[in-house]
Image (cartoon, grey):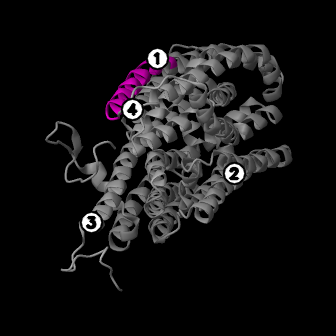
Amino acid sequence: MTSTDDDHDESGGATPRSWSADADDQRNLEAVARGGALNLVGAVVYGATQFLLLAVVANGLGAERAGEFITAIVVFNILAKVCELGGATGLVRTVSHRRATGDVHELHAIAMVAVGGALAAGVVACGTLWVVAPGLAQLFATGGDVDRIASLLRSLAPFLPFAAAYSVVIQGTRGFDTMVPQVVIEKIAKSSAQVAAVLGVVVFGGDVRAALLVWAGVQLLALVPAVVVGRRLMQLAESAGVGQRRRIDLGITRSFLAFSLPRSLGQVFQVTILWFDTLLIAAILGTTEAGIYGTGTRYLLVGLFASEAIMQVLGPRISGLLARADRREASRLLTTAAAWQTAVVWPVYLLVMTFPGALLGVFGEEFLAARSALLFLSIAMLLASPFGPSDTVVLMSGRSRQSLFNTLVAVVVNVGGNLLFVPLYGIPAAAAVWGTTIVIAAVLPAWQSRRTLGVSPFGRGPLIAAVAATAAYLPLALVARVGFGDRLAALGVAAAAATGAYVCILRRFGADVQLEVLFRAIVRRPTRTVDGSWRRAGSSADQTS
């Protein structure tokens, strides 16, 4: 291999510029690892609390009332996502982009546009939901459930402005290269408080309405620390720049909304994909079946939370790299993120698809009807995870319309498939359609990212992670299932033994997966630097991450 004067000095050593580029690459990888590790911890806690919440509702209120609870939350979450107007993603992209280029004097005005838009839209949605609640209830409920669902929706309506504003603020903090606020406030404190509040209601004999009110009330309380932390991060970012703070004007508003509004539609479609099948089952089969499907298939959220944990911390880094036209490093980060995602997701779903009955039995015997649905969704997650969080690259490149198109394709497949097959085949059909949608939503942006941006998730890392997980978990899981049955004890034994084998395989063959970077981010203790800030011991990563 030949070398040039630009790459080496006369002694053959690396020049400062070459060394700096490598150091920057390593800093980016370590920064994503630190944020990803923290976010994965948050995802574990968040996933556990969501399961506890569903278990409390299912066991404390029964499948029918659990179906009403889930149906009301589904409608609320879709409307809250509409009210965000894409502000959360818009803030992440805009803040990270402006910080990367040093142009921070517009950040305050941009944040006001994002949060103000969410509040205004929430007020409109509150009044609208109050008026149309009976009509929505007739769409998604049957018989005597209609009046109860309408009443529950009206109870949640006043919380819409605060839920939308909270989501924009807490997710927008990721644009400052930190995952701490979202992990601590959203994934740990708020989710744990919601479980405790709903459990208290159930223990003291409360009904579905009371459970929903305390669930929504916790979101209102969480808005306070989110705003305090968000303002502090904004002040720190602005102090690092030059120039006078710019006021809100038509140019800023138009520029921000040009990106955020298409993203808003994309987010609405994503939430629709996540929950439309549950609503359709409620409308066709009843709220009891919707409760069984909605609760049983929530095991899918384990992988989705893990994927989102990596995607969220990757987004700001990708935005900064694309702002500097560093596609090589962006591609490297995406491939590594895809490998980490595969390494985390594949063991989970190999076990889920082998022991569906043991996992569903936690909610009660009637929830075993979702066994086939869980199998279809597990296969879909295995197929989708090696493509990595490619949609993040499409979004952070500023192509919110392209991302909207991708999501529109997915929602057409999802809604059309559900309307065609759920009336005929019920719960298994809903899961099969959802699984197909998941695969399409992973493949399409990965192809676009590689073709139009030159940023690809494909590499040895995801493939090695998938093969290692299959070799370690599938044989042991099948032996345990055949020998001891579809039981939690057998699942525990198989998981423990397979995890040991998995670690050994990755240590021997998994250099391209780079899990050691993620592991160091988890186990290294933070140390204080000369200027008093904190960083991971032995890490060269920049301290803004």
Q: Is residue 366 visible?
A: no
> Any mark on residue 181, and which?
4
Q: Residues within 10 Å of mark 3 (few under 14, many from 20)?
A: some
Q: Nearer the viewer, mark 4 or mark 3?
A: 3
Give residue 337's position: percent from left, percent from top.
Answer: 46, 57
> Any mark on residue 406, and which?
2
Q: Along the polypeptide, which appears first: circle 2 or circle 1?
A: 1
Q: What residue is drawn where x is 45% and y is 54%?
A: 324
> Farthest residue toward the left?
530
* Spatial separation of the CA atoms under disc 2 and disc 4: 30 Å
Q: Secondary structure at mark 3?
A: helix
Q: Residues within 10 Å of mark 4 (few under 14, many from 20)?
A: some
Specify start and end residues of the magenta stretch as a single range: 220-241
Q: Is residue 46 left or right of residue 59?
A: left
Q: Along the polypeptide, which appears first: circle 1 or circle 4?
A: 4
For the residue marked with disc 4, what is the amino acid? Pro
Q: What residue is drawn where x is 68% and y is 33%?
A: 291
Question: Is the magenta region chiefly helix, strand or loop?
Answer: helix
Give residue 45's position: percent from left, percent from top.
Answer: 42, 38
> Farthest residue toward the bottom?
1
Q: Nearer the viewer, mark 2 or mark 1?
A: 2
* Spatial separation of the CA atoms under disc 3 and disc 1: 48 Å
Q: Along the polypeptide, which appears first: circle 3 or circle 1?
A: 3
Q: Along the polypeptide, which appears first: circle 2 or circle 3?
A: 3
For the residue marked with disc 1, what is the amino acid? Leu
* Spatial separation of the CA atoms under disc 2 and disc 1: 35 Å
Q: Secondary structure at mark 2?
A: helix
> Any mark on residue 221, and which?
1
For the residue marked with disc 2, what is the amino acid? Asn
Q: To which quarter of the image does residue 65 belong?
A: top right
